Structures are given as structure tokens and as C-alpha cells.
Image: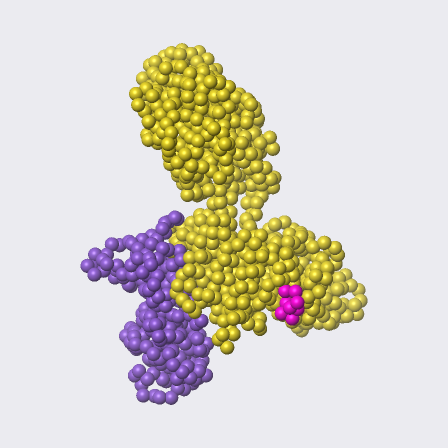
């Protein structure tokens, strides 16, 4: 009698449960517990239970088999009841009960493959409990039938032979919600077999068999995973109170998220506050900025810390602790009314950095007219210049001034950190003869000249003689780096407009060094005022200034150096506390950000106002959706390190560009939220201490082994990264471009995952050709995976020379190059075939 | 009852056997076992049934393969004794001869790596064999024991252009990680257990204890693809086949 008919009777199940709980029970006790009155009934069921129970001279007890069945029934109940996440790590996954589903995909599969033969083949494989054929599984029909099939067969792992995981994996995960995500494996028999091998039905059948068998072997090797769950604190720290930080803060606060806005300067506003107006925005910038600041100030969800820096960061995604240091302001923000009496009386002057040094200010000052908080301040570095005459203290009616104020330490807890500290302006202007007094000024200073609250009260005049200029030359993108942003172009467009309005007779020339030009022209190249030249020089002779280009000489009353943005000087320092990397230009690189840390605004490069604001809005949506849940679960695709094998050599940290692995005095740590699961470190680790949770070595090696059973020659194995190579192969399938059936595709998370051993093993097992197909070198989804594998392959070719050279191909494709994929495969196949014929 | 031991040399320098004989516990060992076949010191010519067969040296010809098959039939446990038997050994540095490990031809029950095996490992392995246990080897790499070990820093570029430390000749070795001095040291990919005796003398690790996870050539290609190997060293194939050649 099979196990299912034994378990079909509730009384028999009850007997098993009771015996499992009590251990040993005598016949009469058992009868009492079951509430039975006649012995015949009990005798019948005890007999039916067969090998599941046993009896010594006194009592009944469970056999080994019986205990196992009870365990399975418990597991089944747990799965059905859908208990919380803690139970996502089933305790019995070492037991493999694999169910296989073949989706006939509306006869698409059946047309080519003898599906019955396929089913027969699969039934014989170890651990396979049941094989079922369904039509169009993705349509989510017959759901009840499917769930019952899973339940009745005690299936804990599922292999679905259907379309590519890229097509319907999510639908399948939904259907089999009682089974862990990582216990569902897909054998891609549609895109990578049936749709591309039309007319080769014999080979296609063999290939499909092996594809599914490999999937079954892979899922058998899957062990249970501990999913890491972290409570999310619904608050965000934003570093930097410029336009990017403020826009984001307001968006988040309106969605009900607590926001801490931290600014190093004594006021919010950033660079935009000092600009006259923004191209494409009608209002003057300080006007709309003051509106924005008012909104921020009155929102109860926002806490603003000015004059504050970050000292230390600890914790991980979802739960960071930030230690802040509030620098002394020497004025009580709450008491100060901004009456400016102290400023009038202060005897010491210094250059006003908010006016870029064009004007002087007092030691105690209010940065600008709409600064927030609107209160006087003495910069911490200025206090040594203070002569402590205490006249300000005496004159202040509100007793707001305290020259002995000390720095204050604060601590906040947040779930997410955002860096929006902006960029710096290029300063090395010697070769341009920069000198504001003789009217060679930067764009930043020109902004102040245009601004109505600036040093010239908004009159467009020369600083040297206070007269309006007749000729203005603008030199574009002043910096010695070769990154070009839209930032300077928008400024130049604005200047053309503004000068036309304020000073209509004035002649304007814009000079652009041709090698710094971007592909896209924001400035109309047909405009006579715009000169694209090879070289620009500035000549000063007496009172006159000239801009000398390739052939021409332009006299100019006012020369504006339109300076570009350069990476913030605080960035390298910030890297110590925040985990991010910088790109080759020194800006923050978006790719490498760890989970829970974001960057926006000009920290990422010279962006315009418009791009910054739209970036902030986009990020706000991302963060709001992230914080809409109470907890996050780290993706199970990461790695696990076995410390018993680790020798702390540090090769893994060398290969990880996400900083996910850290070694401290013979302790090794993986940050699961930083780890993106590319597996490059796993292929590097010499001791085998690092193991991937899902794409482990054993699985890949087993897959190679199964595929090597394919009888025809020459055969090819292709290691494809899931985002590009595998997608390209799928694309060839979707387009139904035919290629040889003698190729087998192994999916890896990233080509960096491919160990040299996999390649050598493939050759050893009889593959004639090995392909590695990954992303384009500069667009690797995991930063350096493509680079690592190309180095490995180059070395393999060098070491083995002619033996392997022509049998190993490394190809970079993107996801839509299915035709190139098919072409490459066919060419490679033809070449290997020809070689085989020659040898014979 | 005493365990029956046999020891044989294939193609080798007999260094491992010398190490065995010079072992401090060798006398006790002789007392505890019944040595049935050991041509190095005994006249017995026939291979007989035994419990443990230690094989030293690599395989280079068909005669040896035949012999190995015979040994496998007679012995309950076969142990590859020394790096040559376990991985192929230094013969692989040659371009023409391919010294193969015995595991290419017969199933083995354990290895005792090292060229020759470090006394501690050898002694412990013999004790394990006497107690009828599995041989336990260190699972960590050499860096774990290394006196010169420094944590490799993130973004730390390593270029390699030397095989030997020049300082060794003048006896002025700077105590610093060899990799940082641009000298190739195979410590990271080599099994621990030798107490870093070469490194303590000022010589970078040659990797005689063998790889841990998989074959040597794969491991070293994975390793060197992380570093910037100079063009001269790239051409020097022996780095990649120091103790083994893959069976392609």
C-alpha cells in the first residue's frame, strides 16, 4: 500500500501524531487517546499503518520511516498555514522531494519534442517524485489543482521546464508561494531549445532532457538558507542642504517619512541660493528657494541641523546610527531675531565667501537675506580672529550671543542615508589671468554681479570702473578635466538671454574649446556669437584684455570664465564613513553604492538644476516605496563565508568592488546588503571558504557534467551572465533565430563568477568549445566582473597556447543582440566541425 | 593486531621517504606496524595484501600504471605520499615530460602533501593512519600562519615582476609581505601546515603544499588574474605548471 493511501484516513494520521508526541503507548492507552470503543477499528488501522509503526511486547512506537513521515506532515502544515518569515527556512530541506512540471506552452513545445518521452526520461531521475504536464502554466489556470499536487506529494522543490526565467519566473513564484523562491528552478526549454532548433527534433529532445536533468540536479544540491531580515527605521538622513537635498527632504516629509537634513554651512540654500536665476525658471532663484525653505521649516517631519557635520556612522541598511557634531554658532538660533544690531557694531571685517570675496562682511554675519535659520552667526574658524570686545554681546537685547558656546554632540537613527553635498567650483585659474579687479571674473562672481542682492545691486557693470561693459567674452567649461556636463552650457544660455535684456548694445562672444565639446550641442553652433575653436588664450596688455583664438583676437571689457564643477573636496573624507566609490573623474559613482546609501545632485557630476531636481524626485519615489514596508530581507543570492577555511589572505576584498567583505584582525565579515551576489570572490577564493547561497560551485560543476552527456560532437558550452549573455540567448529565441542544438548554456550571475576550473573542467569532460558571454566591458552590471574574466581568459590562452586558443571564445553582448549570439554560435560550431573533419 | 604497511617509490627523488625515516616517531612507528613491503630498506619483492599503501613519486610510464592498478587491488587504503604523488610534482616544470599524480589512474584515500611533507603533518598523518582514521590536513591557506601577513587593502594594486627576493642573497630581507614587494609568493593559494619555513628564511612560498579547492593551474590563473603580472613572467610557463599539469 502506498504512503498516500495510508495517510488518507484522519484516524491514521492522528495515530502517527500521538505516537510522535508520546513516544511509546500501550494498546489501551492508545484506544483511550483516540476515543475509540471497539478494538476492531483500531486493529484495522494499526494493520493499515504497516511499516510506519512497530510494537514491542508492551507498547506501540514509530519506526524510522514513520518518524520521517510525521516530520513531512508537520512541514506540510507549516507551509500551508503560511506562517511568518521565520519559517522561510524549512528545517527539512535536506530531504529532496522534487516535482517537475513541463509546460507545453500551448503546443509550442509539443510541436518539436515528444513530450511523453521527455516525461518518461525525467521520472527515472533520482529524487523526482512526480512529473506533470501542464498547458500554459503562466496563465495561472488550474491553480487549485497545482497547489493540491504540491500538497499531496509533499513536494518541497520544483523544477519547471518552460520558458526563460526572464519571462515568467515571477508568475511561477507566485503560483508556488508555499515553496521558497530558491527552491524553484527553471529549465529553459522554450527560448533556448524549442524555438531555436526547429527541424532537429531528435537533438532537441535530448537537449531538453539534459537541460531539465541539470535543473533537477541543481535543485537537489540546494541547501536551506537563512534569510536575513532587518527592521526598517522609517527615517532618512540627508547630507547637504542644497537644492537636491531640500527637494528630496520635502518630497519624503510629505509622504510621512521623518527626515533629518544636515548641512555643514550655517544656512540652507547651497549654490543655487547664490545664483541670480536659473535657466528655464522664471522666478529669481532666491525667491523660489525661500519658498522651498519655508515649506521645509514648517513641515513637522523635517528636522534641520545647520552648521553640523557627521562624525561617525555605524549600523547597516535599515538601521544606521549617525553621530553628529553641531559646531558652535555663538548665537542662540532661537533667541536671535535677526535685527542685525550686532553686525552693525562688530569692528572686524573679512571677505564675504557668499559673495565670492567681492565684498566684505563683518565677523558676525547673516549669510544672505533669505538664509535659514535667519540668525546671526560667527564661523567656528573665525572665532580666533574675534577680539572678544563683547560689544555684540552687550548690544543684543535678546541675549542671544554666547561667545563661549561649545560644540554639541548629537545622535540620530535612520534607515537610509542620502548624500547630496554637491560639487565644488574649479579654482585653478592662473593661466586665464583671473583677476576680478581687472574684469576677468568667474561665472560664479558674474552671478553675484547680476543678482539684485549682490555687490553691485544687480547692475551689470565692470568691477574696475563701475561702467557697463561694451564687449563680453565668455569662456566655456573652464577646467582641466575632460568630463563635460550640461552645467556650463545652461549657464551660457542664460547669460546670452540676460545680457541681451540688461545691456542690449553689449556684444557677447562665447568661446568653446572644441576638444571639450560634448556630443550634444546645447549652444546653437550656427549662432554667430558662439565660437568653437581649438585653443583659447587670454592676453592682458595695459588696460585692455583680449581673447586670442586660433586666428582671431577679440577685445573684451569683461571676460567671464565659465568654470565647471569639480568633485567636492569632502568626498574622499566622506568615503571613510560612507561606503561608496568614486569614478575616474573623482565624482561619486552610482554603481558601487551600498544598499541604503544614495547620492544625488552634482555629487554625481556636473548636472544642471533641472537634472538635479528630477533626480531628487526620482530618488524620493524610490525611498518612499522602500520605506513603505516594515522590514527588508537581504536577497538570498549572496555569499556565505566558512571561517574554518578562511586564511584571511584578503584576495576576496581585492576582487569585491562593493566593499561587502571586510577583514579585521582575523575576523571576516560579509555585509549582506552590500553584497550584490556577483560571485567574483567565490571564483577567486583559493581555499573554497566562500560559498554562494544559490549559484554554488557544486551546482555549476554538476550542470557541466550533465550537459557533457550529450552524445553528438562537436559540442559547445557557453557560460552566460544572466543580465546580458543569457538575455541575448533568450532574445535569439524570441526572434526564433535558429542555431545549432549542440550548444549548452550555463547561467551564471556574472561572468566574473566563472572560475578557470569550470573552463578547464569543460574541456576535460569532452566539450570541444567553451564560450564565455558577458556584458560589454564598460557596462558590466557588477562593475568589474567582465574585466576579471577577460584577464582570466587571456591568461588561459597564453598558458595553454594552441591547445585551447581557438576553442575558447570570450564575447561581449548586450541583451538585444540575439542575432549576433546566434551568428557567433553557428560560426564557432562550423569552425569546430571543420577542424574535427580535418583531424579525421 | 598490527596494521600492515607498504611503501613504494615511483619516479621520485626519495626525499619524502628520507623525511619519513628521519621522523622522530619513526622507531615507534616501526614497532606499531607490520611493514610488509618497503624496497627502500627491505628485500621483499612481492606486493602483498596490506592495510595501508604509501606511494611516493609521480607516474610517467605504463609500467607504473600497471603497478598502481595492482597496488589498488591489494591495498585497503592507498595514500599519495608527498607532492609528486599527490599533484605530479616538480617534473612538470619540464616541457616534455608530464609527471602525473597517482589519482589520475587509481582511487586514493588521502594525500600527505609537501616537498617533502613537513614533519608535523607527516607525523600526524601517520598517527591518523595507525588509528584507522582519515588524514586531517589544514583547510586554511598559508597566509593564515604567515609572519609577514598584512591585510590586503581595498584598491591596493599589486604588480608582480620578480620570483625571488634579491635581499635573500645579501641576507638583508625586508620583513614585508612579498606581494607588496612585487615578488610572486604563492602563499595565498597554498595549503597551510608547513609553518612557513621558506618565508621565515626569506624565500617566497613556492606552493609545494599544493592547492586547496581545485587543481593548481586553475587556482593560480584565478589568483594571478587579480594581480598585474609582468610580461616576462607571463611568458614563463613554469609558474603555471609548478607541481601539476591539467589533464586536457
Quadrant, the C terminus of chain B: bottom left
Position of residue A349 measured from the top left corner of the image (x, y, whole percent) = 35, 17
Specify the farthest residue to the left: B170
Q: Is residue A364 left or right of residue A33?
A: left
Specify the farthest residue to the front: A551
Please determine whether, in this image, residue A234 is positioned above or below residue A266: below
The letter of the yellow chain is A
Position of residue A725 measured from the top left corner of the image (x, y, whole percent) = 54, 56
The colour scheme of the drawn protein is by chain
Q: Can residue A157 be seen from the camera position used here?
A: no
Q: Residue at x 35, y 57 (%)?
A: B229
- Residue B224 among those drawn in magenta: no
**In front: A164, or A502?**
A502
Q: Is residue A424 left or right of residue A261?
A: left
The part of the image, by quadrant, that contains residue A342 is top left
Position of residue A568 measured from the top left corner of the image (x, y, whole percent) = 41, 34
Position of residue A135 measured from the top left corner of the image (x, y, whole percent) = 73, 60
Q: Residue at x 73, y 59 (%)?
A: A106
The part of the image, by quadrant, that contains residue B183 is bottom left
Q: Residue at x 50, y 35 (%)?
A: A521
**In front: A57, or A414?**
A414
The part of the image, by quadrant, that contains residue A330 is top left
Q: Can residue A3 be seen from the camera position used here?
A: yes
Quadrant, the N terminus of chain B: bottom left
Q: Which residues are magenta?
A: A197-205
* Count of all numbered marks drawn on residues in the image: 0
Q: Residue at x 57, y 37 (%)?
A: A618
Chain B tint as drawn: purple
Amino acid at each position: 500500500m502506498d504512503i498516500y493511501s495510508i495517510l488518507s484516513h484522519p484516524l491514521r494520521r492522528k495515530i502517527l501524531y500521538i505516537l510522535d508526541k508520546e513516544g511509546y503507548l500501550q494498546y489501551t492507552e492508545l484506544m483511550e487517546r483516540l476515543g475509540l470503543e471497539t478494538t476492531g477499528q483500531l486493529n484495522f488501522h494499526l494493520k493499515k499503518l504497516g511499516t510506519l509503526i512497530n510494537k514491542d511486547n508492551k507498547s506501540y512506537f514509530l519506526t524510522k520511516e514513520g518518524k520521517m513521515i510525521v516530520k513531512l506532515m508537520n512541514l506540510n502544515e507549516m507551509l500551508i498555514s503560511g506562517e511568518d518569515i521565520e519559517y522561510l527556512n524549512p528545517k527539512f530541506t535536506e530531504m529532496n522531494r522534487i516535482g517537475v512540471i513541463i509546460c507545453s506552452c500551448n503546443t509550442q513545445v509539443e510541436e518539436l519534442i515528444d513530450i511523453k518521452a521527455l516525461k518518461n526520461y525525467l521520472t527515472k531521475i533520482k529524487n523526482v517524485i512526480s512529473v506533470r504536464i501542464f498547458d500554459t502554466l503562466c496563465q495561472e489556470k488550474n491553480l487549485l489543482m497545482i497547489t493540491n499536487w504540491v500538497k499531496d506529494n509533499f513536494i518541497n522543490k520544483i523544477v519547471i521546464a518552460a520558458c526563460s526565467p526572464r519571462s515568467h519566473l515571477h508568475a511561477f513564484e507566485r503560483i508556488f508561494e508555499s515553496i521558497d523562491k530558491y527552491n524553484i528552478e527553471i529549465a529553459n526549454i522554450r527560448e533556448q531549445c524549442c524555438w531555436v532548433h526547429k527541424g532537429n527534433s531528435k537533438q532537441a529532445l535530448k537537449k531538453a532532457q539534459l537541460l531539465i536533468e541539470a535543473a533537477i540536479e541543481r535543485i537537489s544540491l540546494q541547501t536551506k538558507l537563512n534569510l536575513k531580515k532587518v527592521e526598517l527605521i522609517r527615517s532618512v538622513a540627508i547630507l547637504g542642504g542644497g537644492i537636491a537635498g531640500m527637494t528630496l527632504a520635502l518630497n519624503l516629509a510629505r509622504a510621512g517619512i521623518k527626515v533629518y537634513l544636515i548641512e555643514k554651512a550655517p544656512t540652507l540654500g547651497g549654490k543655487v541660493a547664490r545664483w541670480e536665476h536659473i535657466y528655464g525658471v522664471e522666478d529669481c532663484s532666491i525667491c523660489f528657494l525661500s519658498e522651498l525653505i519655508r515649506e521645509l521649516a514648517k513641515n513637522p517631519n523635517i528636522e534641520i541641523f545647520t552648521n553640523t557635520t557627521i562624525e561617525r556612522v555605524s549600523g547597516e541598511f535599515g538601521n544606521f546610527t549617525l553621530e553628529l557634531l553641531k559646531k558652535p554658532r555663538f548665537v542662540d538660533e532661537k533667541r536671535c531675531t535677526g535685527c542685525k544690531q550686532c553686525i552693525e557694531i562688530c569692528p572686524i571685517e573679512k571677505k564675504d565667501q557668499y559673495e565670492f570675496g567681492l565684498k566684505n562682511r563683518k565677523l558676525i554675519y547673516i549669510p544672505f537675506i533669505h538664509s535659514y535659520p535667519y540668525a546671526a552667526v560667527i564661523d567656528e574658524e573665525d572665532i580666533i580672529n574675534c577680539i572678544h570686545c563683547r560689544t555684540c554681546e552687550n548690544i543684543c537685547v535678546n541675549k542671544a550671543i554666547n561667545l563661549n558656546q561649545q560644540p554639541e554632540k548629537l545622535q540620530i537613527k535612520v534607515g537610509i542615508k542620502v548624500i547630496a553635498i554637491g560639487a565644488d567650483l574649479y579654482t585653478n585659474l592662473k593661466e586665464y589671468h583671473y583677476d576680478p579687479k581687472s574684469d576677468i571674473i568667474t561665472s560664479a562672481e558674474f552671478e553675484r554681479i547680476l543678482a539684485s542682492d549682490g555687490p553691485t545691486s544687480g547692475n551689470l557693470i565692470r568691477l574696475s570702473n563701475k561702467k557697463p561693459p561694451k564687449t563680453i567674452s565668455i569662456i566655456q567649461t573652464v577646467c582641466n578635466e575632460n568630463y563635460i556636463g550640461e552645467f556650463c552650457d545652461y549657464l551660457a544660455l542664460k547669460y546670452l538671454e540676460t545680457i541681451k535684456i540688461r545691456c542690449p548694445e553689449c556684444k557677447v562672444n562665447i568661446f568653446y574649446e572644441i576638444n571639450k565639446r560634448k556630443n550634444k550641442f546645447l549652444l546653437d553652433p550656427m549662432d554667430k556669437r558662439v565660437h568653437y575653436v581649438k585653443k583659447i588664450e587670454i592676453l592682458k596688455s595695459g588696460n585692455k584684455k583680449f581673447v586670442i583664438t586660433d586666428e582671431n583676437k577679440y577685445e573684451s571689457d569683461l571676460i567671464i570664465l565659465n568654470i565647471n564643477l569639480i568633485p567636492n573636496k569632502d568626498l574622499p573624507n566622506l568615503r571613510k564613513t560612507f561606503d561608496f566609490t568614486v569614478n575616474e573623474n573623482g565624482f561619486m559613482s552610482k554603481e558601487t553604492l551600498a544598499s541604503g546609501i544614495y547620492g544625488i545632485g552634482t555629487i554625481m557630476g556636473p548636472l544642471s538644476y533641472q537634472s538635479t531636481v528630477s533626480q531628487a524626485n526620482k530618488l524620493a519615489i524610490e525611498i518612499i516605496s522602500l520605506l513603505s514596508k516594515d522590514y527588508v530581507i537581504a536577497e538570498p543570492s549572496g555569499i556565505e563565508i566558512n571561517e574554518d577555511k578562511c586564511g584571511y589572505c584578503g584576495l576576496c576584498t581585492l576582487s569585491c568592488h562593493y566593499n561587502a567583505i571586510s577583514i579585521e584582525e582575523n575576523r571576516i565579515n560579509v555585509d549582506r546588503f552590500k553584497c550584490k551576489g556577483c560571485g567574483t570572490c567565490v571564483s577567486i577564493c583559493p581555499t573554497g571558504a566562500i560559498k554562494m547561497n544559490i549559484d554554488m560551485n557544486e551546482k555549476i560543476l554538476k550542470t557541466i557534467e550533465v550537459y557533457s552527456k550529450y552524445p553528438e560532437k562537436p559540442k559547445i558550452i557557453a557560460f552566460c551572465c544572466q543580465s546580458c549573455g543569457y538575455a541575448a540567448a533568450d532574445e535569439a529565441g524570441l526572434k526564433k533565430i535558429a542555431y545549432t542544438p549542440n550548444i549548452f548554456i550555463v547561467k551564471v550571475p556574472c561572468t566574473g563568477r566563472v572560475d578557470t576550473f569550470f573552463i578547464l573542467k569543460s574541456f576535460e569532460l569532452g566539450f570541444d568549445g567553451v564560450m564565455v558571454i558577458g556584458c560589454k566591458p564598460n557596462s558590466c552590471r557588477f562593475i568589474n566582473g567582465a574585466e576579471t574574466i577577460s584577464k582570466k581568459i587571456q591568461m588561459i590562452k597564453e598558458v595553454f597556447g594552441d591547445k585551447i586558443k581557438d576553442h575558447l571564445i570570450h564575447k561581449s553582448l548586450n541583451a538585444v543582440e540575439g542575432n549576433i549570439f546566434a551568428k557567433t554560435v553557428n560560426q564557432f560550431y562550423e569552425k569546430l566541425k571543420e577542424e574535427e573533419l580535418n583531424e579525421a | 593486531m598490527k596494521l600492515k604497511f607498504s611503501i613504494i617509490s615511483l619516479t621520485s627523488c626519495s626525499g619524502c621517504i628520507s623525511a619519513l625515516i628521519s621522523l622522530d616517531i619513526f622507531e615507534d612507528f616501526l614497532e606499531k606496524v607490520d611493514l610488509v613491503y618497503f624496497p627502500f630498506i627491505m628485500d621483499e619483492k612481492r606486493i602483498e595484501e596490506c592495510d595501508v599503501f604509501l606511494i611516493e613519486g609521480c607516474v610517467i610510464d605504463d609500467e607504473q600504471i600497471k603497478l598502481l592498478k595492482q597496488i589498488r587491488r591489494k591495498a585497503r587504503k592507498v595514500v599519495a605520499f608527498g607532492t609528486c604523488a599527490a599533484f605530479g610534482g616538480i617534473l612538470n616544470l619540464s616541457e616534455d615530460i608530464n609527471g602525473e599524480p597517482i589519482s589520475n589512474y587509481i582511487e586514493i584515500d588521502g594525500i600527505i602533501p609537501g616537498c617533502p611533507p613537513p614533519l608535523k603533518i607527516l607525523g600526524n598523518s601517520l598517527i591518523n593512519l595507525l588509528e584507522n582514521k582519515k588524514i586531517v590536513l589544514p583547510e586554511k591557506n598559508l597566509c593564515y600562519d604567515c609572519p609577514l601577513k598584512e591585510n590586503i587593502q581595498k584598491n591596493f594594486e599589486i604588480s608582480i615582476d620578480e620570483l625571488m627576493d634579491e635581499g635573500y642573497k645579501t641576507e638583508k630581507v625586508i620583513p614585508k609581505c612579498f606581494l607588496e614587494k612585487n615578488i610572486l609568493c604563492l602563499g595565498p593559494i597554498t595549503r597551510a601546515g608547513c609553518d612557513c619555513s621558506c618565508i621565515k628564511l626569506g624565500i617566497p612560498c613556492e606552493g609545494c603544499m599544493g592547492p586547496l579547492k581545485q587543481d593548481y593551474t586553475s587556482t593560480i590563473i584565478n589568483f594571478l588574474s587579480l594581480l598585474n603580472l609582468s610580461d616576462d613572467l607571463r611568458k614563463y610557463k613554469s609558474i603555471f605548471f609548478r607541481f601539476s599539469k591539467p589533464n586536457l
